[in-house]
Image: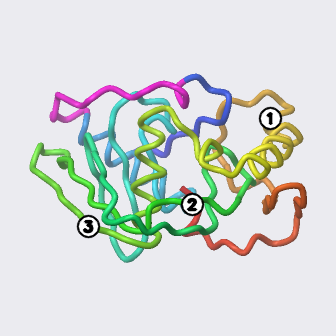
């Protein structure tokens, strides 16, 4: 298994829709193993293949008491309830903000062997499914923020060391200080989120 660098905001792979997986051979098995290892090393709750530069519809997860991976995921909301809570992203180091998501979802897909997977999840795992599937569609969590919060988050991104240095990948996304973004009232105090919120 290999720990991969994390691609950062600005890398085109993060804005590109990932391709459906059709080959369930050894290359996919290695990818899933590498993603799990990389997710663990960086204390992520989830990781999508584009975050390590691979344009395939695969994500891994380790949150809400569940661990695994899903290939070619498709999710649907269960009911209309929403949840708003802290969210961050390994590909946007140091930025966290309250993000609204569906409270409960059903996700279907397959595993690395092509066997069907169906999960009905809520809380952090529902947030993870939605965040990681967004990655596979080329959408970052910044797009899910309220407009004033998104503007504030972008100010934080533009002022961050990795962005001003022009980095498009890092081997240590946790090295950057976290800013908890609240609209026009950004703070650099300890974020109320735990590592579970970093996807």
Residue pointed to by mark 1: 163
The CA span between labels 1 and 2 is: 26 Å
Crowding at label 1, few (<14), some or many (≥20) Cα neighbours within 10 Å? Answer: some
Residue 13, position as x, y percentages in the image: 52, 26
Query: Residue beneath label 3, please?
Result: 120
- Residue 100 is marked as 2
- Tell me which label, 1 or 2, sits earlier in the chain: 2
Q: Secondary structure at mark 3?
A: strand
Q: Residue at x 89, y 63 (%)?
A: 187
Q: Distance of mark 3 from mark 2, alpha carbons?
A: 18 Å
Q: Report the front residue among 131 and 6.
A: 131
Q: Residue at x 11, y 51 (%)?
A: 116
Q: Secondary structure at mark 2?
A: strand
Query: Which disc is residue 187 wearing?
Result: none
* Residue 81 drawn at (x, y percent): 43, 69
Quick check: 57 left or right of 189? left
Q: Nearer the N terminus, badge 1 or badge 3?
A: 3
Give the vertical position of 56 relative to 107 (above or below): above
- Residue 118 sits above or below residue 110 on the image: below
Left or right of 18, for residue 192 = right
Give the percent coordinates (x, y) of residue 93: 70, 49
Q: Which residues are magenta?
A: 13-27
| Along the viewing direction, whichever of 130 and 102 lies nearer the viewer | 102
Along the polypeptide, which appears first: circle 3 or circle 2? 2
> Circle 3: is it few (<14), some (14-19), or many (20+) Cα within 10 Å?
some
> Quick check: is 183 in the magenta stretch?
no
Q: Nearer the viewer, residue 63 or 142?
A: 142
Tell me residue 165's x, y (percent).
84, 31
């Amino acid at each position: 298994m290999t720990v991969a660098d994390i691609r950062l905001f600005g890398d085109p792979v993060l804005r590109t829709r990932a391709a459906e997986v059709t080959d369930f051979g050894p290359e996919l098995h290695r990818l899933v193993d590498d993603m799990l290892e990389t997710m663990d090393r960086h204390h992520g709750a989830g990781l999508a293949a584009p975050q390590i530069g691979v344009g395939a519809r695969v994500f891994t997860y380790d949150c809400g008491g569940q661990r695994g991976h899903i290939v070619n995921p498709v999710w649907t909301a269960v009911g209309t309830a929403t949840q708003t809570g802290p969210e961050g992203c390994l590909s946007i180091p140091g930025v966290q903000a309250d993000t609204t998501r569906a409270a409960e979802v059903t996700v279907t897909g397959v595993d690395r062997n092509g066997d069907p997977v169906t999960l009905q999840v809520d809380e952090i795992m529902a947030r993870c499914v939605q965040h990681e599937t967004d990655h596979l569609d080329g959408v970052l969590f910044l797009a899910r923020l309220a407009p004033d919060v998104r503007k504030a988050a972008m100010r934080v991104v533009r002022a961050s060391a990795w962005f001003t240095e022009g980095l498009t990948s890092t081997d240590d996304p946790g090295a950057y200080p976290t800013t908890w973004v609240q609209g026009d009232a950004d703070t650099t105090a300890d974020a109320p989120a735990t590592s579970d919120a970093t996807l």
